[in-house]
Image (spheres, coloured by chain):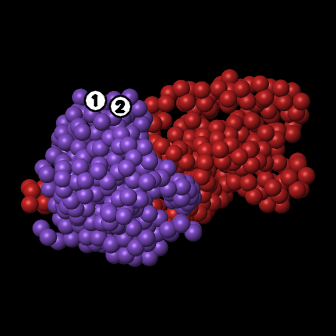
Amino acid sequence: MADSIIRAQNLVRKYGPITAVDGVSFDVSEGEVFGFLGPNGAGKTTTISILCTLLTPTSGRAIVNGFDVTKNREAVRASIGIVFQDPSLDQYLTGYENMRFHAAVYGVPREVYKERIPELLRMVDLYDRRKDQVQFYSGGMRRRLEMARGLLHYPSLLFLDEPTIGLDPQSRKHLWNYVLDLAKKENITLFLTTHYMEEAENCDRIAIIDQGKIIALDTPDGLKRSIGGDAIMLRTADDDEAVRILKRRRMKPVRMKEGVHVAVRNGEAMIPKLLSAMPMQVHSVQLTRPTLDDVFIELTGRQLRDEDGDRMMGFRNAMAGRFRQGRSF
Amino acid sequence: MATTTEERATGRVAPTLNITGAVSIWQRELIRFFRERTRSTTSLVQPLLYLLVFGTGLGAAVRRSAVGGNYRIFLLPGVIVMTALFTSMMSGMSVVWDREFGFLKEILVAPVSRPSVIAGKVSGGATTASMQGLAILIFSPIIGLHLNVLHVLKVIPALILFALSVNLLGVAIASRTQTMQTFFVIQNFVMLPLFFLSGAVFPINTVPAWLRALATIDPATYAVDSIRRALIPYFPAAQIFGSHRTTYFEDLAILAILGVGLFVFAVRGLNKQP
């Protein structure tokens, strides 16, 4: 079981002057649920595209299911399933026809898919709608269909690129139950990307990726432990001064829109000390057990969902998008 | 390990030409075509307008001897080719639509070789375009042309070869362009010249040499000529290479050679992405 199903070594992908993936290395073991967590534009989709053979890396090497992603592209493709970030269904075909098409292009024999398709459609609760065209499906239904389709040819590895993007919280939760359930039933390795912390919690291991680099890789608990205890959020009359005071006390405060964020070893005991150290008025103090969001803040000084936190990031996104459009489908 | 282990996808590589894959892609084109019934019925309106309005109006001004008889009958092969040309280009270019709506990714990431993808795509597009082209023949009694089965059977290979070529051209262009807007540019700068230079609306035997030279390099010329040879045997063959009049089979051979060349061009277009 400990065999690596994905082995990425120093992957680099450049779009002109922009480096979208900057020396990424990691291993994923068989049966694992492995997550890539990071803000938009961090390089998650680019990494997945390389692993799925849709993009060639500028340099570096990746082995998926024992096949090199640049030298043995069709073998890699035949052995993996993918659910793309953007919808990739034919809206004018019915749910069943989309599945049958997939079965045919992946070479699943007719006797097999005749049983497999209804079984999968029942698993994602779409069997009753199988004769409806996909254009009449809701967003959540389409996602579920894509997931069932990704599993159709018995892949040993399923890639999920932001599987829940654009869905409401309820559908997201629902979908996750399906995914984890299916993965367990079919003994499938999952490689997923997300920028939702709650979703990353479902992973066995998480790689936190930012600006094309993996900045941490561990289990969710391990990551939280690594930042050393609790997180305190302070709102004061003068946050800048508060940051200065905390820095003088050898802490690592991070100034954010909502206030000052600081990681502390023992939150309950620290609050009174912090309060007495602040000369200005303190509006509120919030103590939280660490989340993956805190881990991200600790590592990067930015919030995961702080979309406009980095102006260059928006630029990188736009450029990467443009290059991607120009170079691939 | 779960019970499915033995059935697991092993990464076995499909052969270079994957028939099942190509057939599925062909089938998808047909399903979509029949599902959009409005498209297939309204697509008959434009040819009818050309045939009745354009054909009658212009026919009144054209000497019968110049076109070998009734102008509307002369125009019929041109209208068939026009229909096949426009719908083929449209379905070839639908690669752009597929990219826009994401389905192209599903196709490109499948373990099916690029030549198989293109073979399926263009044969689907050619099938539907040929059906639409053939449907024009139902107007032939209206304009006084009486057909037998042999006529129709001779039209089919010419129509299929031509539709395949134009579909391939469409895929080749679409795989090299980014946006849907390009399509309309292509329509003006590729399709209309192909149509007007083909001898669809005037006989190319009597035009000045420069115009005949352009007609000679227009593939649609051979489609129009072969269909005209098939339908109206009494009409004099178009003089293309100098004074040489191509036969029905020479026309087909030229279209077939063109198709092979365009196939390579289209595969390279789809392969160009990294």
Q: Is residue A93 above or below residue A158?
A: above
Residue at image location 83% in from the left, 58% down from the top: B213
Q: Secondary structure at mark 1?
A: helix
Sequence-earlier tag: 1 or 2: 1
Q: Which chain is red?
A: B
Above or below: residue B77 compared with residue B157: above
Tell which of A52 and A25 is nearer to you: A25
Label at residue A129: 1
Left/right placement of residue B238 relative to residue A166 reads: right
Q: Nearer the viewer, residue B178 or A208?
A: A208
> Residue at image x 28%, y 57%?
A263
Relative to residue B77, is residue B17 drawn left or right? left
Whether label 1 touches label 2, CB < 8 Å? yes
Residue A137, numbered circle: 2
- Amino acid tagged 1: Arg
Chain letter for purple, please.
A
For mark 2, does the 10 Å Cα neighbourhood hold few (<14), some (14 to 19), or many (20 or more) residues? some
In the image, A236 versus B268, the foreground residue is: A236
Mark 2 secondary-structure assignment: loop
Compared across the picture, whether B55 is left or right of A214 comes to: right
